[in-house]
Amino acid sequence: MMALQAVALTVVAIAATAVVLVDDPVRQSMVASIMGLFLTSAFFALQAPDVALSMLAVSTVVIPALILLAAARVREIAGPGPRSGDDHDRDEGG
Amino acid sequence: MPPRVRTLLMGLAAASLLGLYVWGAAGLPDFGDTVSVYGTKVASVVSAERQTTNMVSAVVFDYRGFDTLGEEMILFISVVAVALLLRDARDETFEVTAEAERAERSPRGSDAVRALGLAVLGVTFLVGLYVVAHGQLTPGGGFQGGAVLGSALIGIYAAGNFATLRMLEPRGWMDAVHAAGAAGLALLGLGGLLAGGAYFQNFLYTGTSGDLISGGTIPIDNVAVGLEVVGAIALLAAEVLHDGVTAAPPPGEDAA
């Protein structure tokens, strides 16, 4: 049991680092989703099925989906490149 | 604020946080150490007192129901705040929203995703209902089941089933479900007071351990929380889908 828990926690640590290292939010949402799945198995290995269940739904489906939806909307509106407004660019600089 | 000062402030804050974290972590019990007194007590008492087989549900919705009310209010208030923020921008982006809705009507995404989405939808929905209904018996409950049901709603979108999504409009029901769930839990707590006990006292007949109807108020609390969570997820997804994020800052404003 200890070995299983150790493996699960190590995999979570690796996956979480991967999430941070990905730059693009769209890809990041997918990596985060996989990390959620590993975290779910970690909670399961730690004998916390209630927490594992909420983790499963929230972090593998709901959060990545919301990030994706938001990113899709932003992309649809903004187009492939920075389209409207020098104001916007200037805001980022200041 | 000059970048150097900002970096310095950030460094100070991070260093203090690290210090506090290490200090806190050093005082924790060892990994896998003895089960707490509270845990042992609950495990020995719950099934006789409340006829529930899931100790976690009994603690969350009965013995510490007031905590759960606080947690639920955090979710409730954050979702309301997000909805308010995003709705505020709607009027400024009328044209943009129309454009986005046109894009939504034309089919997109692969057939494989749509087929898989449709296949998984019904099962997900059923599992969600099951998890909400069996919180007092097996792992799960209102929050978990509500999140699964919310995933099913998002699945409708992933499956590209816009006709079904249209049926979910107007969004009034989401606000109603969200609010009814939150209010329901608070009112269920009041029931304990009316029965002459304390707030969130379990005032209903607790039934037989292992039956679907057991645990007194615990399953009803689960339904309330389930409603709240479904409403919250639906509301969030709908706000993001239909207006909010589409709002580009209007030129000349937003210089904060």
Image (spheres, helix red, strand yellow):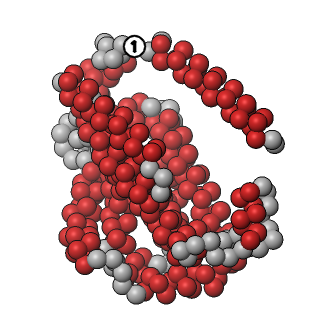
Who is closer to the viewer here, B139 or A13? A13
Which sits in the foreground, B59 or B85?
A: B85
In the displayed structure, A64 sits above or below A52; it is: below
Residue B71: give x, y in percent of width and height: 51, 41
Left or right of A69 in this view: B46 = left
Say whether residue B229 is visible. no
Give the camera-side residue of B130 and B100.
Answer: B100
Q: Is residue B148 above or below residue B108?
A: above
| Among the 4 quarters of the image, the one containing residue B114 | bottom left
**Residue B236, position as x, y percentages in the image:** 50, 62
Which element carries disc 1, helix, strand or loop?
loop
Measuring 65% from the left and 62% from the top, which residue is drawn there?
B85
- Residue B113 vs residue A22, the one in the foreground: A22
Left/right of residue B92 with respect to residue B177 in the rendered view: right
Check disc 1 and give the amino acid type: Pro
Residue B13 vertical placement versus A12 (above, below):
above
Q: Residue at x 50, y 46 (%)?
A: B72
Residue B93 position in % (x across, y down): 66, 78
Residue B81 occupies quadrant: bottom right
- Quarter holding the N terminus of chain A? top left
How many labels were placed on the picture?
1
Crowd around label 1: few <14 · some 14–19 · many ≥20 (10 Å): few
Q: Which residue is mark 1?
A: B29
Q: x, y percentage for residue B176?
A: 51, 65
Residue A8 appears in the picture as rendered:
yes
